[in-house]
Image (spheres, grey):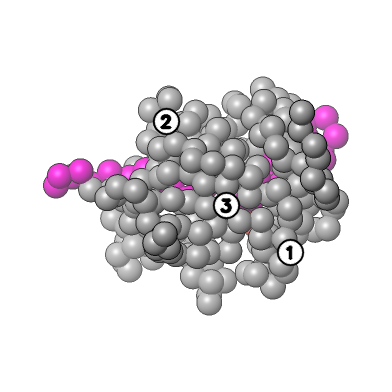
């Protein structure tokens, strides 16, 4: 059997050539990294959970008219997606201060922000993904002003949707990161939500207890990451039937 072609391998996912032109297969690994890959581990079951959760969020976005790369889930770890040209920006939306904004501006973690704040980071591991201004993005040609207007509007729609969904299950959406892709339809380009939306790329706090249900559990050694993601999936009703930490095969009648 011919081996399928690997297009790209990142820290948490692999992209393979898709079955049709304009498609790719996105494979979710169990690898977890933080601090620009200085901290690494393998978290059994994480890839399966993120595949399901990203499907859940992207499908919901598609259904309210926010375009995303998601086409369909293929199996426990893989989904079929549209191939896009990734804009080299991490688009972060914040509702509550945490992480880098707290450090940079001295705002205590947990402070509600007066309005959602959209930030851009230039995707470059060698530089440590630096925060950039719209001026840099336009001057260096990473995106145009009309693209940026679309990106901000997409980011805020994603924020409204995700905040609502998470509030419904007792979770506060503190912040999240998305990536945006360009697709061409005849002579027109369209911007769509790409990459993934999962607890790897969001900060999610339990509304009652303040418990972290996101990658900070790994970054800050707060407990078991797979358990935190499983809790998010359970509350959303998207728990896959087969994620267990079974160490030995079990007999199925
Ligand atoms: N984030 C991400 N990938 C990155 C950097 C940040 O998914 O490379 C997410 C992160 O999980 C959080 C949000 O973006 O939900 C804001 O992250 P922040 O700027 O506070 O950086 P951090 O404290 O994670 O270094």
Q: Which of 243 and 213 is in front in this view?
A: 243
Disc on res. 41 = 1
Q: Is residue 192 magenta?
A: yes
The image position of residue 9, as x and y in percent, is: 50, 65
Visible residue check, residue 229 = yes
Q: Residue furthest left?
A: 187
Q: Which residue is drawn at 42% across and 63% down?
A: 3
Q: How crowded is mark 3: few (under 14 residues within 10 Å), some or many (20 or more)?
A: many
Reply above or below: 215 against 5: above
The image position of residue 225, as x and y in percent, is: 77, 50
The image position of residue 221, as x and y in percent, is: 83, 58
Ligand 1 image position (quadrant): bottom right
Q: Mark 3 points at which residue?
A: 28
The image position of residue 114, as x and y in percent, is: 61, 38
> What's the distance in space between the residues labelled 2 and 1, CA to CA?
32 Å
Q: Mark 2 points at which residue?
A: 62
Q: How crowded is mark 1: few (under 14 residues within 10 Å), some or many (20 or more)?
A: few
Reply above or below: 123 against 188: below
Which quarter shows the N terminus? bottom left
Q: Residues within 10 Å of mark 2 (few under 14, many from 20)?
A: some
Q: What stretch is highlighted in magenta?
A: 185-214
């Amino acid at each position: 059997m011919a081996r399928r072609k690997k297009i790209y391998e990142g820290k948490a996912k692999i992209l393979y050539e898709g079955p049709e032109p304009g498609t790719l297969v996105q494979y979710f690994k169990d690898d977890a990294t933080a601090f620009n890959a200085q901290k690494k581990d393998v978290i059994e079951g994480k890839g399966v959970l993120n595949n399901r959760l990203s499907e859940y969020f992207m499908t919901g976005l598609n259904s309210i008219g926010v375009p995303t790369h998601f086409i369909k889930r293929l199996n426990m770890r893989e989904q079929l997606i549209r191939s896009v040209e990734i804009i080299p920006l991490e688009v972060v939306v914040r509702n509550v201060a945490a992480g880098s904004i707290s450090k940079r501006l001295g705002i205590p973690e947990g402070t509600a922000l007066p309005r959602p704040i959209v930030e851009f980071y230039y995707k470059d591991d060698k530089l440590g993904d630096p925060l950039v201004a719209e001026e840099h993005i336009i001057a260096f040609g990473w995106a145009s002003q009309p693209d940026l207007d679309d990106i901000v509007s997409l980011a805020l729609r994603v924020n409204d949707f995700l905040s609502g969904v998470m509030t419904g299950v007792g979770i506060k959406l503190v912040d999240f990161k998305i990536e945006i892709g360009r697709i061409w339809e005849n002579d027109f380009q369209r911007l769509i939500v790409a990459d993934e939306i999962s607890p790897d790329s969001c900060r999610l706090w339990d509304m009652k207890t303040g418990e972290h249900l996101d990658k900070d559990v790994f970054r800050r050694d707060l407990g078991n990451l797979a358990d935190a993601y499983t809790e998010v999936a359970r509350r959303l009703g998207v728990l896959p039937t087969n994620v267990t930490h079974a160490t030995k095969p079990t007999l199925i009648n």
